[in-house]
Structure formats: structure tokens, C-alpha cells
Image (cartoon, rainbow, N blue to C red):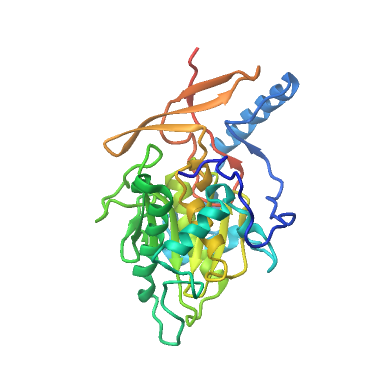
């Protein structure tokens, strides 16, 4: 399993300097896990929280403010909306260490090296993954099977029997249903989805052939080949559509990270309520250690690694969230657990970029 504290003896493998890690732009953000230090700030926070929640409840849905022609736009229309919503896009510099600095606690240097030397999905001698080699006629469909095998092999090698909680699935032909402010028949199909088992995940609200949907995936990967004429913005908007559905169908996510993978490189995208940032293309073969750690982190068994707010816990029965709890601290800094009054937030939003606030109705235990 991947736990904080497993990094004893971890040594960075590629670039060491982390001084240029991207910083989230300042924004107003109130969460259920804020630690209170003095009574004056608590009073101010309570007053602000009441004002903000009141504004959220009273304001019109955001989609009316960004020129949406209807509350159930087609996928291509949605991409244009997301393009306006997420600007400016933040592209990290070529020498950024963001990707290589993440998830070092998930696997130390020795473990990753042992994996790469022993696994059948990596050629240690030639320093390359067992993926199709690049050529002008290479098709994207040729990448699905070897990548699914590669991902599941990483899970099984590092997690053993616990790998059953994460399974990479080829979903490029699977219609994952969308959730919108109104009834919709829209869907999308990430090339590879990681189906998750655990109390934070539930069956999709509509039936799918493999019972997989945005409500029970821990991560997704999009596959390209280098002979395709795809721009990075097209890739970003495709991933943004998937990330939006995770934020909508699993509203206690704080951020969503995903990879675009080709036969030669990968690119990391990070979505949160302030927008999106992404790396330059990174050689997947020369940076096999970084790629391995990213796979372990993006699909981690430790839910805070993948982006979930683990102050919220769920009870699932017959594949559906039945009830939940929210753990926070009172103004005297004493920890308290509230029963959620509903498994949905007070107000459900349908955007990626917006104020960093999720409101939940709770029942006071006293």
C-alpha cells in the first residue's frame, strides 16, 4: 500500500530541485477541515461562511454566466465552454520538477529499481517499456492492450493482494454517463479508466456494461500516438471534460490529475478549482521511475493522494452511498464528527473552475 511515511531512504532519481513547484493562485477557500486558532478569526470565518453559502444558494447556476446556449450542451459545445472557463492555461517550464517531485512516498528508489529490473513490462537492458515502437502508421488502438497490462502490472507488483481495489480497464468504447443540471444522454469514453473499490466509490447512476462510471474510477489515462496531429490544448480540453465529471459525480474531490500517454512520452495535467496546469512532454522511457511513481500516486490506495478529501467518509450499501460523516474541529480545536444530512452537497456545481467551497448539510451530534 502507498502510505505517507513509506519514504524512508527514498532518494530522488531524476531532478532534485523542487523550488519551482507550481503554486496555486490565491483564492477564497473555506473547507470543512479548517483548523481554528483563535476565537476572533472563528467569528469572522462564521460570518463569512454564512455570507458565502447564502450567495451560493441564491446565485444562478454558473453555466448561465458563460454563454451556454442550453443546460445540456453537446460534447463539442462543452469543450468550448471549458476553454473559456479554464483560461489562462498554465504550461510549466521544460525544466519544471513538478512531475518528478510527486508521490515519492509511494515508492522509494530501491523498490522502483527492483520493479523495473524484474518486471516483464519493462526492458531493463534497453531502458524502455514494452510498448509499440513509434512509426508513421502506428495506430492508437495498438496502445490500449499493452498499456492496460503495464498499469495493472504496476498495481500488482507494488500492492500485492490489495491491487484488487484498483483495476485498469480499456474504456475507449465504453459510454460513461454524464451528470448535468438537467436530464442528459451525454457520455464520454476515457481510453483507460482505473476502476476503484472502496467506501468512497459507488456504482454509476446509469447502467454500463462493466459497471464502471465516473462515480467509481480513481483515475483515467488518455492515449495518443505521436503521428496524430493533436495540439496540447485539444488534449487538455478532452481531459477537462473527464475531470469535470469526476468533480460532479464525486464532489468531495479537491483536485484531479491525469496523464496523456503516447508511445514516446507522457504529459501530466493537474485540475483544481483554480484552473489547470500541465507539464511539458516527458520521455516515458528515460523517465520510467517518474512514470511509475505517478501511476502509483494517481491511482493510490491512499485516497488523499488521488485527490479525495478524506475528512469525509462514506457508508456504501449494495454499491450506493447510503450515508456519510464529516470530521472537522470545533472553535476550541476539539475534533468532532458530524453526520451528513445528505450524500450530496448543499449545492452541486458543474464546473471545474470556481470558488473553492463545497457546502454540506450536517447534523450536530450534541
**Which x, y percent locates residue 43?**
70, 22
Q: Position of residue 209 (x, y in %)?
A: 24, 56
Q: Which residue sits at x=47%, y=35%?
A: 345
Relative placement, left or right, of 112 versus 213 is right
Q: Is 252 located above or below residue 71 in the figure?
A: above
Task: Examine the rendered structure and indicate whether residue 344 appears above or below residue 118.
Answer: above
Residue 360 pos. (x, y %): 50, 31
Numbered label tally: 0
- In this view, the residue farthest toward the bottom is 136
**Residue in the image at 43% along x and 62% along y:** 118
Q: Residue 161 occupies which quadrant of the picture?
A: top left
Split into 4 quadrants, where in the image is the N terminus? Answer: top left
* Residue 78 is at least partly visible in this image: no
Q: Give left or right: position of 128 versus 104.
A: left
Q: Is residue 335 above or below residue 240?
A: above
Q: Residue at x 46, y 73 (%)?
A: 224
The answer to whether residue 145 is visible is yes
Residue 335 position by quadrant: top right
Looking at the picture, tell me which residue is in the foreground, 87 or 272: 272
200 left or right of 268?
left
Residue, x 36% and y 76% (percent of image)? 142
Percent of width and height locating residue 56: 57, 38
Q: Nearer the viewer, residue 199 or 299?
A: 299
Q: Is residue 80 above or below residue 323?
A: below
Amino acid at each position: 500500500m502507498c502510505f505517507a511515511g513509506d519514504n524512508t531512504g527514498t532518494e530522488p532519481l531524476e531532478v532534485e530541485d523542487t523550488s519551482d513547484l507550481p503554486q496555486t493562485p490565491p483564492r477564497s477557500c473555506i473547507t470543512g477541515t479548517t483548523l481554528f486558532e483563535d476565537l476572533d478569526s472563528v467569528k469572522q470565518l462564521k460570518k463569512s461562511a454564512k455570507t458565502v453559502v447564502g450567495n451560493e444558494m441564491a446565485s444562478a447556476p454558473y453555466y448561465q454566466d458563460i454563454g451556454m446556449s442550453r443546460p445540456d450542451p453537446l460534447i463539442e459545445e462543452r469543450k468550448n465552454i471549458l476553454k473559456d472557463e479554464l483560461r489562462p492555461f498554465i504550461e510549466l517550464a521544460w525544466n519544471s520538477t513538478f512531475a518528478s517531485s510527486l508521490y515519492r512516498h509511494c515508492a522509494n528508489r530501491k523498490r522502483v529499481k527492483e520493479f523495473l529490473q524484474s518486471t516483464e513490462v519493462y526492458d531493463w537492458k534497453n531502458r524502455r517499456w514494452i510498448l509499440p515502437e513509434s512509426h508513421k502508421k502506428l495506430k492508437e488502438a495498438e496502445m490500449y492492450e499493452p498499456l492496460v497490462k503495464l498499469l495493472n502490472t504496476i498495481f500488482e507488483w507494488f500492492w500485492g493482494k490489495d491491487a484488487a481495489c484498483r483495476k485498469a480497464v480499456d474504456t475507449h468504447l465504453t459510454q460513461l454517463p454524464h451528470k448535468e443540471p438537467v436530464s442528459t444522454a451525454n457520455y464520454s469514453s476515457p481510453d483507460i479508466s482505473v476502476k476503484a473499490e472502496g467506501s468512497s466509490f459507488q456504482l454509476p447512476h446509469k447502467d454500463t456494461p462493466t459497471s464502471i462510471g465516473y462515480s467509481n474510477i480513481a483515475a483515467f489515462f488518455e492515449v495518443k500516438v505521436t503521428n496524430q496531429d493533436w495540439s496540447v490544448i485539444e488534449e487538455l480540453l478532452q481531459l477537462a471534460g473527464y475531470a469535470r465529471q469526476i468533480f460532479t459525480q464525486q464532489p468531495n474531490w479537491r483536485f484531479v490529475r491525469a496523464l496523456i500517454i503516447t508511445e514516446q512520452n507522457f504529459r501530466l495535467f493537474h485540475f483544481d478549482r483554480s484552473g489547470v496546469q500541465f507539464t511539458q512532454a516527458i520521455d516515458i522511457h528515460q523517465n520510467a521511475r517518474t512514470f511509475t511513481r505517478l501511476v502509483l500516486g494517481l491511482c493510490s490506495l491512499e485516497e488523499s493522494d488521488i485527490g479525495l478529501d478524506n475528512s469525509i467518509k462514506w457508508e456504501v450499501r449494495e454499491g450506493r452511498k447510503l450515508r456519510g460523516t464529516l470530521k472537522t474541529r470545533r472553535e476550541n480545536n476539539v475534533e468532532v464528527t458530524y453526520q451528513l444530512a445528505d450524500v450530496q452537497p448543499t449545492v452541486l456545481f458543474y464546473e471545474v473552475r470556481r470558488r473553492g467551497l463545497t457546502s454540506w448539510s450536517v447534523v450536530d451530534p450534541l
